[in-house]
């Protein structure tokens, strides 16, 4: 009996030593949590979100740290220099999709999957570009309808940003992505409800394990998912039957020989951008002067948007300050290293973007909203490395930037944005950062 006890203790010590060798930044506490089914999931729940857990993890263990997602070991990188070391050999796959598939239990892809991902990215880029080119008047119309509505409000009326701008985003996304069917408000509302049910559970229920513990939530999620899939299949079938007469995103995908793809987009960039402008009068006025100088009184066009350089800086700073996408990931396709840390093959490597975007070593006064920082070329290089611009950016990001640019170019030239005194805006960190509660502003007409 004593021999067996000695053997058992020795075995556990060797096992822990092996894990510490493979994951040198993991604390002994985190290693021991592997022996429970949930790993660090209770810690994530206690912190409130995966992002907030990662902030604490990197504060304690530095820019390279590890933890257990259930029984799966995960490495997290929390500094630009560490990401730079890791991204070069792992740039070929979509980082956001990699994280979702890995955390939700999909099997990892092989070299063929990487090739497919690169082809799909090119197809998406072409489809999004064509969709914007052919549907830009519709996008402008939807924005102008919202701005007209706001212009009719008295100055004292509080305007709910989340409700209105998520409504705008959903109308724009559904009509541009899936066609005329979604000109019916009832269709948009139904799609939005299912989208929110699915997105909230992917962003929280799966990441903290709570979905599996609630049969009612899981049933609601699966029902919303089934209805969403049915709608998308119906749209794809209808678009396929209409050939090239439609100019929606789904139609362009079908022309490229891709079948039903889930096309969802979240335009929280608009909410945060309008909020930050309402609390920064100087930035708002400088943006107004650029818009007048470049556009005059004419509506914005797709060709003019690249000339709105300060507007682009405002949107970049919105993404950074709001930590709009607080995390992404890569799958370690071959064994690699970051500094002295060995990362075994098939390890999920999370990019703690929310941590990096507030890192004082990379950004001066990181908690201040300052679009001027993006006039610096070195800052833009860091931003591009994180996947928010340049060749690393996902195709959907161009759509988000375009919608936000159209909104700001129309809104700021007609209305002044004012913050509501005493309002405290807190963030909810899931897969995309949103305000916890609706955010309010007031508006007044210019001239």
Image: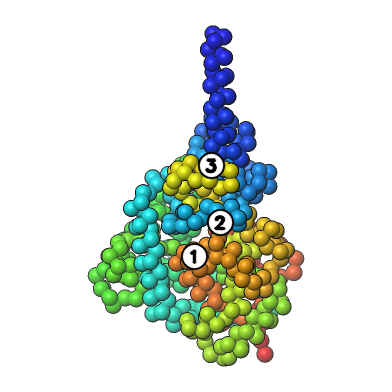
In this rendering, the count of numbered labels is: 3
Separation of marks 3 and 2 at Cα, in angstroms = 16 Å
- Give the residue number, with chain letter if any, for mark 2: 84
Q: Position of residue 84 (x, y in %)?
A: 56, 56
State the SS at label 2.
helix
State the SS at label 3.
strand
Give the left or right position of residue 337, taking residue 447 as reference. left
- Residue 404 sits in which quadrant? bottom right
In the depicted view, which residue is nearer to us: 193 or 118?
118
Sequence-first disc among 3 and 1: 3
Give the left or right position of residue 393, taking residue 277 as reference. left
Which quadrant would the N terminus be assigned to in this image? top right
State whether residue 209 is above or below residue 375.
above
For the residue carrying disc 1, how many other residues have a C-alpha within 10 Å: few (<14), some (14-19), or many (20+)?
Answer: some
Q: Can residue 327 be spotted in the picture?
A: no
Q: Can residue 6 be spotted in the picture?
A: yes
Separation of marks 3 and 1 at Cα, in angstroms = 27 Å
For the residue carrying disc 2, how many other residues have a C-alpha within 10 Å: few (<14), some (14-19), or many (20+)?
Answer: some
Which quadrant would the C terminus be assigned to in this image? bottom right
Sequence-first disc among 2 and 1: 2
**Comparing labels 2 and 1, the label whose residue is closer to the camera:** 2
Separation of marks 2 and 1 at Cα, in angstroms = 15 Å
State whether residue 176 is above or below residue 41.
below
Residue drawn at (30%, 63%) of the image? 258
State the SS at label 1.
loop
- Give the residue number, with chain letter if any, for mark 3: 342
- Give the residue number, with chain letter if any, for mark 1: 393
Q: Position of residue 50 (x, y in %)?
A: 58, 48
Residue drawn at (57%, 29%) of the image? 17
């Amino acid at each position: 009996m004593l021999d067996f006890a000695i053997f058992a203790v020795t075995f556990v010590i060797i096992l822990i030593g092996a894990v510490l060798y493979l994951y040198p930044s993991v604390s002994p506490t985190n290693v021991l949590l592997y022996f429970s089914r949930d790993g660090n999931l209770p810690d994530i729940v206690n912190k409130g979100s995966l992002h907030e857990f990662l902030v604490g993890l990197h504060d304690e263990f530095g820019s390279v740290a590890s933890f257990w997602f259930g029984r799966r070991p995960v490495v997290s990188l929390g500094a630009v220099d560490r990401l730079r070391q890791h991204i070069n050999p792992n740039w070929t796959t979509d980082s956001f999709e990699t994280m979702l598939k890995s955390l939700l239990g999909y099997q990892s892809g092989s070299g063929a999957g990487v090739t497919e991902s690169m082809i799909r990215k090119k197809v998406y880029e072409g489809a999004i570009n064509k969709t914007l080119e052919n549907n830009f008047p519709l996008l402008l119309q939807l924005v102008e309808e919202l701005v007209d509505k706001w212009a009719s409000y008295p100055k004292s009326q509080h305007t709910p940003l989340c409700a209105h701008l998520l409504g705008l985003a959903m109308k724009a996304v559904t009509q541009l992505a899936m066609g005329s069917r979604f000109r019916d408000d009832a269709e948009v509302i139904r799609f939005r409800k299912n989208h929110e049910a699915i997105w909230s559970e992917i962003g929280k229920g799966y990441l903290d394990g709570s979905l599996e513990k609630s049969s009612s939530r899981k049933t609601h999620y699966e029902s919303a998912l089934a209805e969403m899939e049915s709608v998308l299949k119906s749209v794809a079938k209808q678009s396929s039957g209409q050939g090239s007469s439609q100019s929606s995103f789904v139609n362009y995908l079908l022309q490229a020989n891709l079948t039903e793809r889930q096309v969802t987009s979240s335009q929280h960039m608009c909410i945060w951008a309008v909020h930050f402008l309402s609390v920064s009068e100087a930035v708002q006025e400088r943006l107004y002067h650029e818009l007048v100088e470049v556009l005059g009184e004419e509506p914005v066009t797709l060709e003019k948007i690249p000339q709105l350089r300060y507007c682009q800086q405002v949107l970049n700073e919105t993404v950074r300050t709001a930590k709009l996408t607080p995390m992404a990931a890569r799958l370690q396709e071959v064994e690699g290293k970051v500094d002295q840390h060995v990362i075994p093959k098939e390890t999920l490597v999370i990019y703690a973007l929310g941590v990096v975007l507030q890192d004082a070593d990379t950004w001066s006064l990181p908690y201040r909203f300052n679009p001027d920082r993006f006039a610096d070329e070195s800052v833009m290089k860091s931003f591009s490395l994180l996947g928010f611009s340049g060749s690393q950016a996902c195709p959907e990001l161009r759509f988000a930037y375009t919608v936000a640019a159209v909104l700001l170019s129309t809104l700021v030239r007609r209305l002044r944005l004012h913050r509501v005194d005493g309002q405290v805006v807190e963030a909810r960190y899931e897969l995309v950062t949103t305000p916890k509660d609706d955010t309010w502003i007031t508006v007044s007409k210019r001239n």
